[in-house]
Image (tube, rainbow, N blue to C red):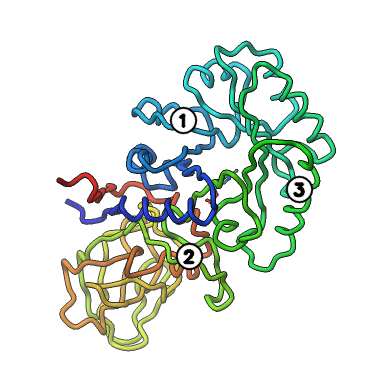
Amino acid sequence: MRPARALIDLDALRHNYRLAQRLGGGRALAVVKADAYGHGAVRCAAALQDDADGFAVAFLEEALALREAGIRAPILLLEGFLAADELPLLAEHALWTVVHAPWQVEALARANPAQPLDVWLKLDSGMHRVGIDAGDYAATWQRLRAMPQVGRLVKMTHFARADEPGQNRTREQLDAFDAATAGLPGETSLCNSPALLGWPEARGDWARAGLMLYGVSPFAGDPATRPAHPPLRPVMTLESRVIAVRDLPAGEPVGYGGIFVSERPTRVGVVAMGYADGYPQFAATGTPVAVDGRPGRLIGRVSMDMLTVDLSDHAGAGVGSRVELWGSEVAAGDVVAHSHTSAYRLLCGVKRVPLQYRDTALRG
Ligand SMILES: *Cc1c(COP(=O)(O)O)cnc(C)c1O
């Protein structure tokens, strides 16, 4: 059997969820869209079910998959419904929906759901992707509040640059939210992971935590300039093993394109992991790995099914040695820093490797 796999630590997931809840100071939706950022939405939601105040996914099909798997907690659709004919299913499965556009308000006004739908009315406070314009927000809120089709009405917005410490835009978005929602009663929801971890002045009744649940920091760049926050526990460990070794003299190219040339006699370890598994194709030579628990480095270009590491300083390492690509020994954020990618895409990109779960709560 190919040794590549992703180990998913569900205890760490619960730890990070409770941290999100605590930092937010209220309730928190666990964001499990995109198959829980590559970690398996059904297993992650099941592991969080006893703790989580609710879940969030991007769209209806993702929510229905959770309901079919027996997840009974509230689920919010972050993109809302994409067509009016989805509304009966929302009511049937007790799904909460974002409303971000005038046509959705009209669709609700014409609908006759079996029970009132919980609506999260999204303000465009400056991200300019989706959301109701600030000037229309209060009137839209009043209109929805008067509809028998609408149950709970939550005021919501989303930050564009909360992962940039000190960026003034987040403060401006906060001010825009406060101004547009002034005098409107009810609960609020503002924070994604970077806001929870880096912007204590931004709080609401419901946090929406995604990336941080999976134990990866949303902040890039120099660690000294990143916001201080309690440690996250990495959830995914991506690992494989060395399947071949070759000893090269100095001056020999390794792999496609010959982009790495050995500077000295080099022991090359070939690892069963490639970009088809989600490892970044353009991770640079020097990207950290761990070989049998010791720090090492990637060399040469990552290929589809294999990558190469430098074993020259790893006495005793050889075929069968365990290589961690990221997890508790290699921070996913350090791989990101070498790879022209983001932490989000790194995790969402994992595929083909089997996911194996660890959950001490299920033992005994
Ligand atoms: C994906 C998403 C989140 C979660 O963001 P993270 O940065 O992963 O915590 C929160 N809110 C909305 C609207 C989203 O689309």
As drawn, the label of residue 336 is: 2
Write down the quadrant of residue 319 in the picture: bottom left
Q: Using the image, tell me which numbered label, if any, was put on residue 178.
A: 3
In front of the other: 32 or 208: 208
225 above or below 2?
Answer: below
> Which label sits in the foreground, 2 or 3?
3
In three-dimensional space, the C-alpha distance between marks 2 and 1, rounded to whole angstroms, equals 29 Å
Residue 63, which numbered label? Answer: 1
What is the three-letter code of the residue carrying label 3?
Answer: Asp
Pointer 1 and pointer 3: residues touching (CB < 8 Å)?
no
Residue at 37 percent across and 52 percent down: it is 13
Number of residues whose C-alpha sits closer than 10 Å to that of mark 1, classed few (under 14), some (14–19) or many (20 or more): many
Q: Nearer the viewer, residue 306 or 314?
A: 314
Query: Is disc 3 placed on a helix, strand or loop?
Result: helix
Give the spatial CA distance, label 2 vs label 3.
35 Å
Number of numbered labels in the structure image: 3
Establish if 156 lies above or below 170.
above
Residue 81, by quadrant, is top right
Residue 1, image x, y percentages:
16, 51
Is the residue under label 1 in contact with that under label 2 (CB below 8 Å)?
A: no
- Amino acid type, callout 2: Val
Residue placed at 70% from the left, 43% from the top?
129
Q: Earlier in the sequence, mark 2 or mark 1?
A: 1
Dot 3 beta carbon under 8 Å from ligand 1: no
